[in-house]
Amino acid sequence: MISIAGFVVYKSHSSMVKTKSAAAPVENKVSTKQVKSNNNNSNSASNNVEKTKSSAPVTNSSPEVKKKIIVIDPGHADRSNLEKEPLSPGSSEMKIKDGGGAEGVATKTPEYSVNMSVSMKLKALLESEGYTVKMTKTKSSESLGNVERAEVGNKENADLVIRIHADSSDSSKVSGASMLVPEPINENTRNINEKSMYYGKTILNTLVSEVGMNNRGVVQRNDMTGFNWSKVPVVLVEMGFLSNPQEDKLLCSDEYQNKLAQGLCHGIKAAVK
Ligand SMILES: [Zn+2]
């Protein structure tokens, strides 16, 4: 779950408290642009994937193919982190590092646990496809700020950073996946917006068609620190709603997590060539 601009949303068992940040933009003012996703790209997963076999000998005559670098960023940690950091390079607007994630309405499973499980499964799948994979963190006890997370992708000069999250809503009926991408608001995000949009759309369409769930589309966001600091293409997938009892149970099952990781892996293969 990602909190709306200017608000930090804390969810506890019995109540929800909204805390206004200093800048206090109106919730609806966030200039997100809903982009209609195309559900019809059925042939995305299987074609033209560049496979790099790590064990294959490299011949002297052909140049070595550089492996694509994918950074996986599992959302949240086993505690919130209320320290603040600049929303964007050079910005005086400060945003807290991690307000904490969602929680399964039926299973009570914390979001960070689902995020980490799917992230580790995706890592294994991508590595078996020949990608180089770097994790921003591998332990749920590691609590990172979003500038730190972005700097992992920047340092690696990643071809793609994929941030793994699960969603939450006040309504228990809302379901499905969405993809958040950076809106072009500063030098960083202007440079990565186009690729991030394309990657996000391709990965989301592959994911929802393979797993069989509601497609909530690609949304551009200007209020996410981890986007605004990124110099490399970055997307954030919300894999489904922990506030929906059926989807909560699915998200917490090993079998469904395997399907999610497969769908994401196939989407990345279709997108990053
Ligand atoms: Zn989240």
Image (cartoon, rainbow, N blue to C red):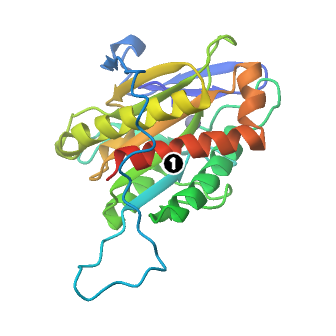
Q: Nearer the viewer, residue 262 or 187?
A: 262
Left or right: 130 in relation to 260: left
- The answer as to whether callout 1 falls within 8 Å of ligand 1 is no
How packed mark 1 is, by other alpha carbons closer than 10 Å (few <14, some 14-19, many 20 or more), is many
Q: Is residue 155 visible?
A: yes
Which residue does the image show at 51% across and 58% down from the upper left? Answer: 126
Where is the N terminus found, in terms of image quarters? Answer: top right
Q: Where does the image place residue 80, in percent across and percent down from the top left?
A: 62, 44
Foreground pick, 238 / 43: 43
Above/below status of 8 relative to 236: above
**In the rendered view, would you say 106 is above or below 158?**
above
Secondary structure, mark 1, is helix
Q: Residue furthest right?
A: 107
**Residue 12 sits in quarter:** top right
Mark 1: amino acid: Cys
Q: How many marks?
A: 1
Specify the quarter for ligand 1: top right
Q: Position of residue 39 (x, y in %)?
A: 42, 21
Closest to the observer: 55 or 11?
55
Q: Position of residue 102 (x, y in %)?
A: 66, 31
Residue corresponding to mark 1:
265
The residue drawn where x is 31% and y is 42% is 228
- Can residue 86 be spotted in the picture? no
Q: Position of residue 123 (x, y in %)?
A: 56, 58
Q: Is residue 198 above or below residue 218?
A: below
Viewed as shown, does residue 215 lie left or right of 184?
A: right
Residue located farthest toward the bottom when viewing the structure as drawn: 60
- Picture layout, residue 13 above or below residue 206: above
